[in-house]
Amino acid sequence: MSNPLKKTMVYLGLADEEETYEETAPQPVARKQSVQPAPVEKAAPVTPLHRPAVVRQPAAGPVSEILTVHPKQYRDAQTIAENFREGIPVIINLSQMSDADARRLIDFASGLSLGLYGRIERVTSKVFLLSPENIAVSGDGAIAQADPEAAPFAAQ
């Protein structure tokens, strides 16, 4: 490979290096009468994962609390997640956040609700409801869809 362009392309990963192999004649190997077994390597110790014996499930009883959150920064997502994991419906009012942080928080809330089998619904353009899987939400969802201010957070 004496071509400098080819060498450069191989260096940059744009071409495969062509290697030439010289074949050598096989050398006869003298056989020993007794064959020694190969030494056995010890496997690395394995630490088993211990999962909690009791998995926390949200209570299936009536709703006694709904949390309303007015986040100002993305770090307020922790409060939303902790309460939603406990089975508490969360109303998120994004009116005090920038559009970029609000989108980021809604992406987080969407993943949270998907991961915990809940739902996320738009109430107005900047208000969302996270409801756990054991909570039924009734109402006309078409009102939120027809909201003209819903454009900043519309699905892309």
Image: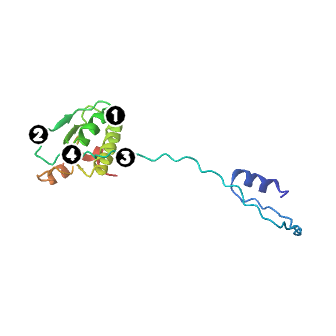
Q: How many marks?
A: 4
Q: Quadrant of residue 37?
A: bottom right
- Give whichever of discs 1 and 2 has the lower sequence position: 2
The disc, 4 or 2, on the residue closer to the chain's N-terminal end is: 4
Q: CA distance from mark 1 to mark 3?
A: 30 Å
Q: Relative to the observer, which residue lies in front, 5 or 75?
A: 75
Q: Which residue is mark 3?
A: 51
Tell me the element at label 3: loop
Residue at position x 78%, y 64% in the image: 35
The answer to whether marks 2 and 3 mark residues whose Cβ atoms lie closer than 8 Å is no
Can you tell which mark lies on residue 58? 4
- Cα separation between marks 2 and 3: 30 Å
Q: Which residue lies under the disc numbered 2? A: 64
Q: What label does residue 74 carry, if any?
A: 1
Q: Is residue 149 above or below residue 96?
A: below
Going by the numbered disc 1, the residue's amino acid type is Tyr
Q: Residue at x 49, y 45 (%)?
A: 47
At horizontal 67% and vertical 55% (from top left) the residue drawn is 40
In the rendering, at what x and y percent does residue 113 appear? 28, 48
| Disc 4 residue type (three-letter) | Pro
Which of label 2 and label 3 is nearer to you?
3
Q: Nearer the viewer, residue 35 or 47?
A: 35
Q: Nearer the viewer, mark 1 or mark 3?
A: 3
**Position in image of residue 94 (x %, y %):** 25, 36
**Which amino acid lies under the numbered mark 3 shown in the image of this protein?**
Arg
Q: Nearer the viewer, mark 4 or mark 1?
A: 4
Earlier along the polypeptide chain: callout 4 or callout 3? Answer: 3
Spatial distance from mark 4 to mark 1, Cα to Cα? 25 Å
Q: Which mark is residue 63?
A: none
